[in-house]
Amino acid sequence: MSSVSWLNKVRWDEHGLVPAIAQEVGSNDVLMFAWMNRDALAKTVALGEAVYWSRSRKKLWRKGEESGHVQKVHEIRLDCDEDVVLLKVTQAGDIACHTGRHSCFFQKFEGASSSWQAFDPVLKEADTIYK
């Protein structure tokens, strides 16, 4: 198998992207969702740390490059349709979300009040995380 043929197995969308889910090893908490392109996935494999594609900035970003909250990748999985990547990670600093929370999925829908409620605490104020 050539050095990049494994990338051809992934079903990239029309923009050359694939959804990527970061899941914490041990707790199995879903930490975040992001996008990857071929370069991001290849760099993730090469570095052993999560690298994503920022659609807003139109560039690669290594998770934690500013905050220090790096994701060490232990395992990479591809779903049955080959169009979603799952990263099993250890989250440095226990913070994955730019809001300073453990997970980006901190809001829970409360049916009784028909509203979204934040249920995970802020571990570190966002304005102290980024340089």
Image (tube, rainbow, N blue to C red):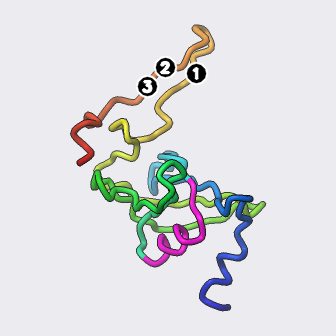
Q: Tags 3 and 2 in contact by the CB under 8 Å rule?
A: yes
Q: Residue drawn at (71%, 76%), measured in percent from left and top?
A: 8
Magenta-drawn segment: 35-46
Amino acid carrying label 3: it is Phe
Q: Tags 2 and 1 in contact by the CB under 8 Å rule?
A: yes
Residue 47 marker: none
Residue 67: percent from left, percent from top: 29, 51
Sequence order check, earlier mark of 3 and 1 = 1
Which part of the image, by quadrant, shows the N terminus? bottom right
Magenta stretch contains residue 52 = no
- Alpha carbons under labels 3 and 2: distance apart: 6 Å
Residue 124: percent from left, percent from top: 26, 37
Left or right: residue 89 versus residue 85 is: left
Q: Which residue is mark 1?
A: 109
Sequence order check, earlier mark of 2 and 1 = 1
Q: Residues within 10 Å of mark 1 (few under 14, many from 20)?
A: few
